[in-house]
Image (cartoon, rainbow, N blue to C red):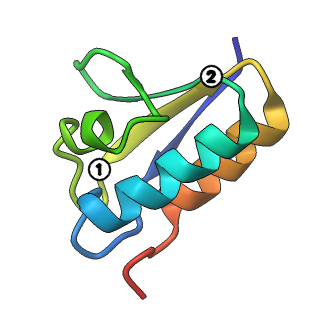
Amino acid sequence: MPSTTVAVGSSIGLHARPAATIAEAVSAAGIPVTLAVAGGEPVDAGSALLIMTLGATVGTEVTVTSEDQGTLDKVAGLVASDLDA
């Protein structure tokens, strides 16, 4: 399954607002996507609550995995963006 690793771009990390934005994009795509930090279990990126459990702060490397390359690229772009700006 395709995956890519990106650094969290949001200045406060993947807290409620960025997590909700990512979860909404995944839900709209209708394609399963997971997020994982090094040493952690992958979580469903369609759930803002599960995304927040990653504890990912700015600069934390997150691995994004999905069977659909377009969805993977979109979600990876969101994780890498400063969604607090």
Screen quadrant of the C terminus: bottom left
Is 27 or 64 nearer to us in this picture?
A: 27
| Helix, strand or loop status at disc 2 | loop
Residue 57, position in %: x, y?
21, 57
Residue at 71% in and 26% down: 31
Image height check: is 58 above or below 37? below
Residue 17, position in %: x, y?
33, 67
Quadrant of res 1: top right
Is residue 66 at all visible to an observer of this figure?
yes
Real-space Cα distance between discs 2 and 1?
Answer: 22 Å
Image height check: is 29 above or below 79? above
Residue 38, position in %: x, y?
28, 26
Image height check: is 21 above or below 25? below
Q: Amino acid at mark 2?
A: Pro
Q: Residues within 10 Å of mark 2 (few under 14, many from 20)?
A: some
Determine whether, in the image, residue 44 is placed left or right of residue 13: right
Report which residue position mark 2 lands on.
32
Is residue 8 at all visible to an observer of this figure?
no
Q: Amino acid at mark 1?
A: Thr
| Helix, strand or loop status at disc 1 | loop
Q: Of callouts 2 and 1, which one flags the residue occurring earlier in the amino acid sequence?
A: 2
Q: Residue furthest bottom?
A: 85
Residue at 21% in and 71% down: 12
Residue at 62% in and 22% down: 32
Report which residue position mark 1 lands on.
60
Label of residue 80 in the image: none
Residue 36, position in %: x, y?
37, 28
Image height check: is 70 above or below 63? below
Residue at 28% in and 33% down: 50
Quadrant of res 64: top right
Determine whether, in the image, residue 40 is placed left or right of residue 9: left
